[in-house]
Image (tube, grey):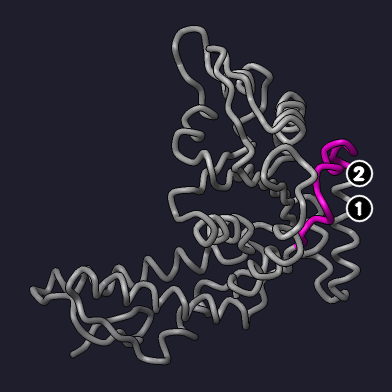
Amino acid sequence: MLDRLVEEIVCRELNTVPQTGCRGALFFAGPTGVGKTETARFLAAQLFGPAAFVRFDCSEFKTPEVVAALLGSRQGDPGRFAQAYAQAPDGLWLFDEIEKSDPAFIQLFLQMTDAGRLTLVDGRTLDLAGLYLVLTSNLGSAEILGRRHLPFASLEKHVLHCIQRHLRPELLARFKRPFVFRPLTREVQAEITEQRLTDLVTWQRQQGRQLTYDPAVVPFLLQRGFSPRLGARPLLDTIHELVGNAIANDLLEGCRGHGRLVVEGAQLRLVR
């Protein structure tokens, strides 16, 4: 699923000449829990490697003073941008929920995309030419979740209208058309459940435990974790909690965490 989306992003956005001073700028919009952050993380890993992803929570940038501190302080703090640059001078920086930030951050972001560089408090200049900068937004999401019977084209149009109404035109001019993410259907969340279970089985094997699962485990987890409003987050929490409990209980019983996950009553259990 992420492979297909990233392929679309690469074809539509990243194979064109950038309109900004950085390597490129992307805008992801849509409800919470639908994979905006995971898509950015996966894209960074595919292009540069897993260490080349840095996430900033824009809800933390609520005052001009906090925004200014991103560039460091005269007391010797290098600032979060300098720390991020040390980690990923070539990579992807994600700024989550841009609508929650102070206008001072919007102005700073405009400088980043226009000039492609940042000047820190200590006088150093960061060259951003090797970075993709990605913004996410939940604007219009409540209406999407309340009108899911409408065609997606209508929902997408509504989201784009909300974005244009709330965000500055000069900010939106830094991007091509935003990617609007669909709410996750039950079928998609079933795919996510299977993929996460596969990942957990692989990880447990790396820890020396042989783990498989009964097919009934997938609908069991989906029934308990599915949320049309909150997306995949409750589902992922449910998977980790119930699978983790099954393995922990097996270990507490003096076993080794090997076996087949099966549904037993209201929980999962390992059997041999």
Mark 2 crowdedness (10 Å alpha carbons): few <14, some 14-19, many ≥20: few
Identify which residue is drawn at 77% across, 52% down. 17
Where 244 falls versus 127 (above or below)?
below
Residue kind at label 1, given as amino acid type: His
In depth, the one of 258 and 113 nearer the eye is 113
Position in image of residue 230 (x %, y %)? 62, 62
- In magenta stretch: residue 54: no
Taking 49 as reference, is 248 above or below it?
below
CA distance separating discs 1 and 2: 6 Å
Mark 1 touching mark 2, by CB under 8 A? Answer: yes
Rendered image quadrant of residue 70: top right
The image quarter containing residue 188 is bottom right
Residue numbers of the magenta segment = 165-180
Q: Nearer the viewer, residue 163 or 4?
A: 4
Give the x, y percent position of residue 45: 50, 58
Say above or below: 90 vs 200: above
Q: Nearer the viewer, residue 86 or 225?
A: 86
Q: What number is the disc on residue 161? A: 1
Q: Residue at x 32, y 87 (%)?
A: 262
The residue at which mark 2 appears reads as 165
The image position of residue 65, as x and y in percent, is 63, 16
Amino acid found under the numbered disc labelled 2? Arg
Looking at the rendered structure, the secondary structure element under dot 2 is: helix
Q: Quadrant of the C terminus?
A: bottom left
Query: In screen coordinates, is 157 left or right of 6?
Result: right
Label 1 secondary element: helix
How many residues crowd around disc 1 within 10 Å: few (fewer than 14), some, or many (20 or more)? few
The quarter of the rendered structure image containing the N terminus is bottom right
